[in-house]
Amino acid sequence: KDFLDLVNRSLRLQALVRRQQQLGAHLGPAGEQPVQFGEFTLHPSQRRLLRQGVEARPGGSLQELSVMFIDIAGFTGLSERLGDRVVPLLSRYLDLTSEVIVANGGTIDKFIGDAMLIFFGDPETKGDRADAQACLRMAWRMQHRLTELNAKWRASGIEQPFRSRMGINSG
C-alpha cells in the first residue's frame, strides 16, 4: 500500500510538472490579452512573473506598498431598503471600480462584501513615491467615475445611490 501511494504521488507530480511546462510554452508576447488554457487564465502580471522565473513559495517579503480600502457607506441599510434590487447595482459598482483599479495599475487583493482592498507596489513597483501617487490618482479617478454613475442612477429614480468611503496608507 505504501508503495502504491508513493507511485500515485509520483505520477501526480509528473503530471503537474508536464502541465506547468505546457503552460509555460503557451505564454504569448507581452501586451497580449490573458491566454486561457482550460481552467487557467493568466493575467499579464502572472505572465511577467513566470517569464522572470519567480517561484511561488510560502512566506513572503516586507516591502513598501500603498494600500487603499474602499467600501460603500451605509451599505447594510441601503441593501435592506432596496432588497434584491441592490444586486445589479452592486455588480455595476464593483465592475466600475475594478475597471478603474486595473486601468491605473492597482492590484485587487480581495473583495469583502461591498468593500475592496487594493494595493500598489507589488508585483511591480515604480518606486514608493510613484506608487503612492498612482494610488491617489486612481482614487481621484474612481471618485469621478462614481459621481457619473450616481448621476445616472439618480436620473433612473434611485434616490440615494452609493456613497463610497476610501482610506489610503503608504508604508
Image (cartoon, rainbow, N blue to C red):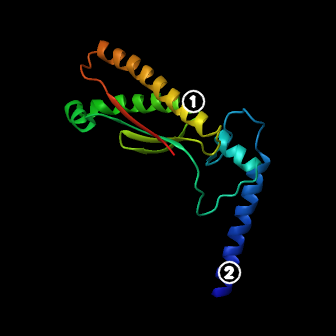
Q: Where is residue 4, by image quadrant?
A: bottom right
Q: Would residue 25 be found to the left or right of residue 59 on screen?
A: right
Q: Which residue is mark 2?
A: 6
Residue at 73%, 50% in the rendered image: 50
Name the one closer to the observer, 113 or 14: 113
Which of labels 1 and 2 is toward the front?
Answer: 1
Residue 4 versus residue 93 in the image, above or below: below
Amino acid type shown at disc 1: Asn
Q: Where is residue 115, by image quadrant?
A: top left
Measure the alpha-carbon separation of dots 1 and 2.
Answer: 48 Å
Q: Residues within 10 Å of mark 1 (few under 14, many from 20)?
A: some
Q: Secondary structure at mark 1?
A: loop
Name the one closer to the observer, 31 or 86: 31
- Cβ atoms under marks 1 and 2 closer than 8 Å: no
Amino acid type shown at disc 2: Leu
Residue 95 versus residue 8 in the image, above or below: above
- In the rendered image, residue 51, in percent from the top left (x then y), is placed at 76, 47
Residue at 42%, 24% in the rendered image: 143
Q: Would residue 66 be found to the left or right of residue 111 on screen?
A: right
Name the one closer to the observer, 20 or 8: 20
Q: Would residue 106 be found to the left or right of residue 168 on screen?
A: right
Query: Of label 1 and label 2, which has the lower sequence position?
Result: 2
Residue 135 versus residue 9 in the image, above or below: above
- In the rendered image, residue 15, in percent from the top left (x then y), is placed at 72, 64
Q: Which residue is mark 1?
A: 104
- In the rendered image, residue 34, in percent from the top left (x then y), is placed at 66, 38
Q: Secondary structure at mark 2?
A: helix
Name the one closer to the observer, 115 or 38: 115
Residue at 50%, 30% in the rendered image: 136
Residue at 65%, 58% in the rendered image: 56
